[in-house]
Image: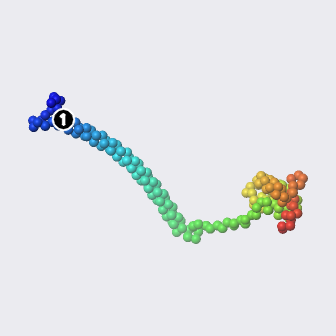
Amino acid sequence: MSDSVKHSPTGFNDIRDGLRERITLLEDMASDEQAKFTAEQDKIIAAYKQKMDSYRSTIASYKRLLELEEGFVKHADEISAKIGPKQVGVVETKMPIPPALPPLGDFFCAELIQRGNLSKEQLRQLAFDAGYFPTSEGGRATHATLVNLTRAGRVMALKDNVFSAREREKAFL
């Protein structure tokens, strides 16, 4: 037999040193796993605390907003009690709904039929007066519409930016 193998007093191989080495190895592995677990747990706890702090902050903001709103309502109720309910509150205003305007091209054709030959500037001013343009602008829209009407054969371009309705347009009215 070799000298490297130790024998126990009972005559069997002595495996106690091997078992001690394995126990030490397993304890080191368990310690490493515990350290990894603790590090992950710390990360999760930190993320949880951050999320909860965010919730608490948001809740506090909403509570403050509710306090302000309740103070506003209380103040409005106090004013209403002093002045009277008929004078405080939402004032209803009825805004007239503007009538729907026909397309700009149809408007130009109708004006040319009713008034005769008109210049581009006169047509632009009539469209502005009718509410087609919010400001006194509208030159581009007027020009583009008149070009399209001319190409479609609905109006004729005469000299000096003057336009006239075609005869077939006059038949429609």
Q: Is residue 140 left or right of residue 167?
A: left
Please give left or right for residue 133 compared with residue 12 in the image: right
Q: Secondary structure at mark 1?
A: helix
Q: Residue at x 9, y 35 (%)?
A: 9
Which kind of residue does numbered mark 1 sit on? Asp
Residue occupied by mark 1: 17
Residue drawn at the location 86% of the way across and 67% of the way down: 171
The residue closer to the viewer here, 173 or 99, is 173
Picture quadrant of residue 60: bottom left
State the image coordinates of residue 161 (x, y, percent, origin top left). 86, 53
Which residue is situated farthest in the front direction here?
Answer: 1
Question: Dot 1: few (<14), some (14–19), or many (≥20) neighbours within 10 Å?
Answer: few
Q: Quadrant of the C terminus?
A: bottom right
Q: Nearer the viewer, residue 161 or 53?
A: 161
Where's residue 166, x and y in %? Answer: 87, 61
Q: Is residue 146 visible?
A: no
State the image coordinates of residue 34 (x, y, percent, origin top left): 30, 43
Q: Work out which quarter of the rendered image holds the N terminus and state it.
A: top left
Q: 73 or 61, which is in the foreground? A: 61
Which of the pair 161/75 is nearer the observer?
A: 161
Location of residue 133 in the rendering, given as x and y in whole percent from the top left corner: 75, 57
Residue at point 86%, 61% (across, down) = 165
